[in-house]
Image: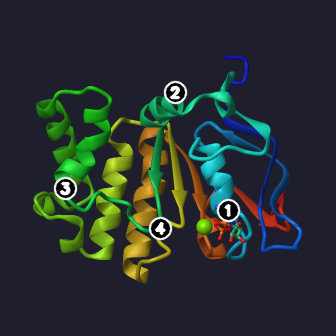
Amino acid sequence: MSNSEFVLRGEGISKSYESEQGEARLEVLKDVSIDIQKGSITSIVGSSGSGKSTLLHILGGLDKPDSGSVFWGDKLISSMNSDQLADFRNENIGFVFQFHHLLPEFTALENVAMPALIAGESLEKASERAMSLLERFGVANRKNHRPTQLSGGEQQRVSMARALMNNPPLILADEPTGNLDDKNTTTILDMLFELREQEGVTILLITHEKAIAKQSDIILEIKNGELSSL
Ligand SMILES: Nc1ncnc2c1ncn2[C@@H]1O[C@H](COP(=O)(O)OP(=O)(O)O)[C@@H](O)[C@H]1O
Ligand SMILES: [Mg+2]
């Protein structure tokens, strides 16, 4: 891989949305380029509606840019079809969202095991690893709870466990603590930062709070559709 120092690279990404009738299109991202380096923690800050989630979704293969490219190493992921993208995401990216996105009809353990089951892992092996991840994040005793029976902090711990289930080299976190109190915010962020220390996981973190961003290696700001270093 000639670009091995970069896990993920976005080149010239533009994205706009239809506006109210008669108004100009909403240009959310204008020719944005970004390199996420292996083992780094990159934070993206910006006011609400500035395009942070849009960028993260495009980089993570959840959405397509209008123009521009997204590379994973040498692989062009922005041209993959939806089946290829689903496999790619399942194998390589752990997502953590502001709102947990856990499946309501499944238990914590089942939610965590799901990515491995989708990847074809046996139920026994997947459950074993899911259990050890729940233990790691201090919620093993909630394994049979459904998401609505968990507190916000517990939901995010379960989400972190799920994100790590397939051992992804990259975590994309979209305001993972946006909905939590100070204590849970600190815990979840410590857990994220620990992942890089202990396992060399690369992390792209979207956050509202500049204080959080300061703990990361690289801070980028989105403003008026453009990305710049802080
Ligand atoms: N599917 C969509 N259709 C129309 N407008 C959208 C859509 N998704 C996002 N937007 C708009 O694009 C802008 C950026 O959204 P988003 O990336 O979610 O911002 P952020 O995550 O920084 O708060 C917002 O003004 C939002 O309303
Ligand atoms: Mg957002």
Kind of residue at disc 2: Gln
Kind of residue at disc 4: Gln
Location of residue 39 in the rendering, given as x and y in whole percent from the top left corner = 58, 40
Which residue, as the protein is rendered here, is positioned at the far front? Answer: 21
Q: Which residue is mark 1?
A: 52
In the image, taking residue 154 as reference, residue 25 lies left or right, namely right
Q: Give how far apart the Cα atoms at labels 1 and 3 are.
A: 30 Å
* Quarter of the image where the C terminus is located: bottom right
Between marks 4 and 2 in the image, the one whose residue lies nearer the viewer: 2
Element type at marker 2? helix
101 or 71, nearer to the observer: 101
As drawn, the label of residue 203 is none
Location of residue 14 in the rendering, given as x and y in whole percent from the top left corner = 81, 49
Element type at marker 4? loop
Q: Earlier in the sequence, mark 4 or mark 1?
A: 1
Kind of residue at disc 1: Lys
Q: Which residue is mark 4?
A: 98
Q: Which residue is mark 3?
A: 106
The answer to whether the residues at label 1 and label 3 have Cβ atoms under 8 Å apart is no
Which residue, as the protein is rendered here, is positioned at the far top? Answer: 1
Q: Give how far apart the Cα atoms at labels 4 and 2 are.
A: 26 Å
Q: Give how far apart the Cα atoms at labels 3 and 4 are.
A: 19 Å
- Indicate if the residue with disc 4 has its beta carbon within 8 Å of ligand 2: yes
Location of residue 119 in the rendering, given as x and y in whole percent from the top left corner = 32, 29
